[in-house]
Image: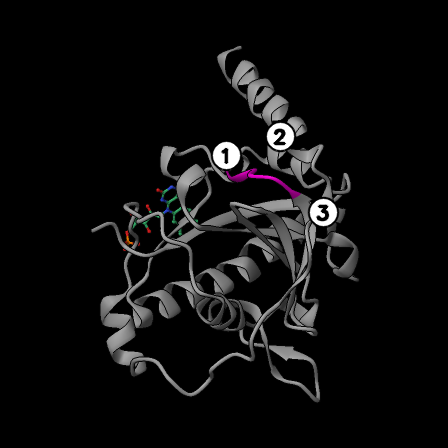
Amino acid sequence: MKHRLSTMVVLLGLALAAQGVAQELAPITLPAPQTDGGKPLMQALKLRASSRAFAPDPLPPQTLSNLLWAAWGINRPQEGKRTAPSARNWQEIDLYVVMDKGAYLYDATAHQLKPVVSGDIRAAAGTQDFVKDVPVNVVFVADPKRMKGAPPDQVQAYAFADAAFIGQNVYLFCASEGLATVLRASVDKVAFAKAVKLADDQLVVFAQSVGYPKK
Ligand SMILES: Cc1cc2nc3c(=O)[nH]c(=O)nc-3n(C[C@H](O)[C@H](O)[C@H](O)COP(=O)(O)O)c2cc1C
């Protein structure tokens, strides 16, 4: 009952935020990713950790660009393949990037953020207190329509595995850049699906918060 009430409160807030609608939100063309920097892999692995203490400062566009490319960008343009593996190259995971101005969908081909919902819906990207104030919450959403031939009872397992590789890319990027991050299963999937108007068959897998460490 308490859970249902809090879902309703979140949904009400989101409905108000969504009145600002996506057309007011411009696409964000990200600068080209810088793919030759960062710490050596072994140092990044040494530093990889979850953190739940974030500063409110936004990420600069270049950092956001590098983060999304590292997470799930295209690293072999001729084949359209990505920085993370996916079962049978289904590429079924979409990244919803939820920031203070609104929610966007990461288009890896254009390396652009497409507007989804304007307004601050960060509270719908997780159930932990810090989520509503973190500058970037990335929500991993699987589209089973792309998973041709997946046995229905294995769709979720493949989607979770594929999303986890992206999550580890985010962890390693953050370790390399001195950013704070935590992968989270704690997302109210119903509230988030409503907030960004997912189709019934789309599956919210996890979310991951990213920001500067709290000073
Ligand atoms: C699948 C998965 C789900 C997780 N969900 C949450 C979560 O909802 N909230 C949270 O604060 N941390 C979550 N974590 C982070 C773990 O708590 C964290 O990885 C673990 O405590 C080990 O700490 P470390 O990542 O610093 O090594 C999750 C991690 C994984 C892999």
The main secondary structure of the magenta stretch is loop
Residue ranking furthest to the left: 215
Residue 64 vertical placement versus 181 (above, below)? below
Q: Which residues are magenta?
A: 118-122
Residue 6 vertical placement versus 195 (above, below)? above
Left of 154 or right of it: where is 207? left
Which of pointers 2 and 3 lies earlier in the amino acid sequence? 2
User: Dot 1, how many residues are within 10 Å of its Cα: few (below 14), some (14-19), or many (20+)?
Assistant: many
SS at circle 3: helix
The reply to whether the residue tagged 2 has its Cβ within 8 angstroms of ligand 1 is: no
Magenta-colored stretch includes residue 119: yes
Mark 3: amino acid:
Glu
Mark 2: amino acid:
Leu
Residue 72 appears at what percent x and percent y?
56, 69
What residue sits 28% from the left and 64% below the top?
A: 48
The reply to whether the residue tagged 3 has its Cβ within 8 angstroms of ligand 1 is: no
Residue 59 vertical placement versus 120 (above, below)? below
User: Dot 2, how many residues are within 10 Å of its Cα: few (below 14), some (14-19), or many (20+)?
Assistant: many
Q: Residue tagged by mark 3?
A: 24
Quarter of the rendering containing residue 39: bottom left
Quarter of the rendering containing residue 200: top right
SS at circle 2: helix
Q: Residue tagged by mark 1?
A: 123
